[in-house]
Amino acid sequence: SYFQCPRMGYLQSAKFIAPLMVVKVTGSLSIIGSLSIVVDILKTKRDDGQPGNNRKKKLGAISNRILLLMSICDIIYSFFAWFLGTWMVPQESGAFWASGNEATCTAQAFLQVMFYGSATCLNATLAIAYVLIARFGWKEDRLRKALPQFWLLSFPLLFFFGLGLWFLFNGSFKYNGGPTCGVDRNSKVNSVLGMAWQISCFL
């Protein structure tokens, strides 16, 4: 079955609706916070009012590039998962405010895997970049080479994009009765996603 839901009455109860409202608010705050980081990094005017291109200077630092990409991933994830929430859940599920269908549910689950996973992993690579700079004395020129940039910037997106496709082709995206669609809790491949996130958090 496409739905792995608890009791239908629960999906219309205050116990379900209250957390749903909370995550919509916190998701909106997350979007605003990440958007402010993106604007700060990409703005061209310097903070001190002196002439020069602020964007070029900030993007020259690998840490700012990682932070920019991580913030963009968080904006996409927070919008489609927490802000839209049950609006993308199939209407026939009976969940409060459910207005979507199987296609929107699958899209929401895929975007969660890709962009939440990427943001988590980019948080780890940001820490790695700081360690390389502070502990091992790596310079920005060395970090801007193709191989370090691949592992620090490109790899998280490619890995979780591929993982999302794998879940998609295995039919692992379901509505489990929460505020969003996600990976089927009863699916064996769900453990792979959990392991990937745990490794990212550990790093």
Image: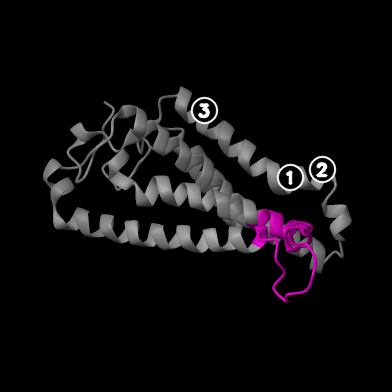
Tell me: residue 5, above or below residue 137: above
Tell me: residue 119, above or below residue 137: above
Whether residues under marks 1 and 2 lie with C-beta atoms below 8 angstroms apart, the answer is yes
**Distance CA(mark 2)–CA(mark 3):** 25 Å
Question: Where is residue 52 drawn, in percent x and y?
Answer: 80, 65
- Residue on which the image places disc 1: 151
Magenta residues, start to end? 41-67
Near mark 2 (Cα within 10 A), the count class, few <14, some 14-19 or many ≥20, is few
**Distance CA(mark 1)–CA(mark 3):** 21 Å
Question: Where is residue 151 drawn, in percent x and y?
Answer: 73, 45
If you read the primary sequence from the N terminus, does the residue marked by circle 1 or circle 3 appear first? 1
Q: In terms of depth relative to the viewer, which is nearer, 203 or 129?
A: 129
Who's the residue at 85% across and 64% down the image?
Answer: 136
Label of residue 166 in the image:
3
**Distance CA(mark 1)–CA(mark 2):** 7 Å
Who's the residue at 36% across and 51% down the image?
Answer: 83
Q: Amino acid at mark 3?
A: Trp
Q: In terms of depth relative to the viewer, which is nearer, 197 or 162?
A: 162
Most extreme residue toward the bottom, as rendered?
A: 48
Q: Nearer the viewer, mark 2 or mark 3?
A: 2
Question: Where is residue 15 drawn, in percent x and y?
Answer: 18, 57
Who's the residue at 56% across and 51% down the image?
Answer: 72
Is 139 part of what is drawn in magenta?
no
Q: Could one spot residue 173 in this view of the protein? A: no
Check the image and tell me how it is coloured.
one colour
Q: Amino acid at mark 1?
A: Trp
Q: Is residue 141 left or right of residue 101?
A: right
Q: Is residue 87 left or right of residue 189?
A: left
- Residue on which the image places disc 2: 147
Tell me: residue 20, above or below residue 29: above
